[in-house]
Amino acid sequence: MKLYSQKQIIYLVCSHVSRRDFERLGIKNWIDHGWKVEVFDITKFLFPSFSKYINGNKSGTYFEGLTVFQNINEVLSTLKSLQNNVVFIDNIGFSSEEQKIRRVARNHGVLVRIKLGSLPESKNKNNILSVFSLIKNPISLVNKIISFFKNKIEKIAAQKYFSDYIVVGGIKSMSGINDKKTSIIKAHNMDYDIFIQEKQTKLNKKTNSIVFIDGGGAYHSDDIRFGATPGVTADNYYPVINRGLNEIEKSLKLNIKIAAHPKSNFEINQKKYNHSIFENKTFELIRDADVVVSHNSTALQWAVIMKKPIIIVTTDEIQNAPYAKIFKSSIDEFAITLGKRVVNLSQLSSVTNWKDYLNVDDAKYEKYIENYVKTKGSPEKLVWNIVIEYIEKDLF
């Protein structure tokens, strides 16, 4: 591979870079290692509705290396004008427009794809109940057919423009990587960095609390970004969750705290939940909790790493509503993977003793880490330091 003479990196992103993303995407790490860093944001023309939804405080406009493009021609023109070989962090999708951007970018450098954050997913994607529900709803059936062929086309396109490097975390994140010319950088999920940084602290600290990991509820910004129907409705979801959390709190004699989802509407959630809700404190709340309650959050990896008892919950709406099928399937798969029973908070009378749900299956927890969190044998370093060291050794 051709050696590079200048340390220049460009992030290609299709979602506004928030302050949280600035840290998670390792922008500061690259700068600290002497790299010139830029971020090319294509959200505005790719997802115009989502772009309008995000306010200025979350758009990341504070970063001087950020360029927000108005249309695809601006992006392509800027890429074609690059004089030096560049390292691109490929954080965009596989639509026709994004593939054009990817193709031109690769003519001016190498592509690094981040393939982290794999989650348990159902192996039974074509069950009979789903088919019957689609037949009863012709519009959904047509949309599913369109989505199926679109995904097929995008996967073919993705194979055509391979990545030079792929960063993986866990066995499951390595699935689908077939090109022998692609270099695999073995690492771990970004959230594992926080665990590494906190290892010096007392991880088994307890505060007589239970943390409920908010999944975004009816106000997840990704639903707006992709024009998707939320997996729950506000009128049905929050009353059931509040009653359920009250019952758990009363039974286990522990205080409920809610960890707000980073992509949820915090102001609205403050009004919807009956318990104290905290923003940007998910790790700390899980670390200090006696019990963790959730549906299917990626943040559960922290609970798994720290061997916390986990209660997986659902509701009648999630179990039965056609728009919640994917959500339900994900919850069920999380429960199976972790060796848990799912508790339906709409049917609290079926629970006789909440302590029966606090088992920790050590073997399943360890398997979860191996499959979804950290690649076996990967360095115990911050993920972006692993990537930077690998790239610098390979290209310079």
Image: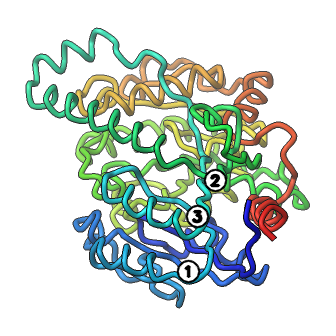
Residue for point 50% across, 28% down: 121
Q: Which residue occupies the foreground of this view, 304 or 56?
A: 56
The percent position of residue 136, horizontal first and vertical second, equals 10, 18
Q: Amino acid at mark 2?
A: Asp
The percent position of residue 71, horizontal first and vertical second, equals 27, 74
Determine the CA span between mark 1 and mark 2. Answer: 19 Å
Quick one: SS at disc 3?
A: strand
What is the crowding at mark 1: few (fewer than 14 residues within 10 Å), some, or many (at least 20)? some
Residue that label 1 marks:
38
Q: Which mark is residue 89?
A: 3
Q: Earlier in the sequence, mark 1 or mark 2?
A: 1
Determine the CA span between mark 1 and mark 3. Answer: 10 Å
Q: Earlier in the sequence, mark 1 or mark 3?
A: 1
Residue that label 2 marks:
164
Q: Which residue occupies the foreground of this view, 100 or 143?
A: 100
Q: Are marks 2 and 3 in contact (CB under 8 Å)?
A: no
Quick one: SS at disc 1?
A: strand
Is 13 placed left or right of 118 in the picture? left
The percent position of residue 326, horizontal first and vertical second, equals 36, 31
Is 124 placed left or right of 284 in the picture? left
Q: Which residue occupies the foreground of this view, 395 or 362?
A: 395
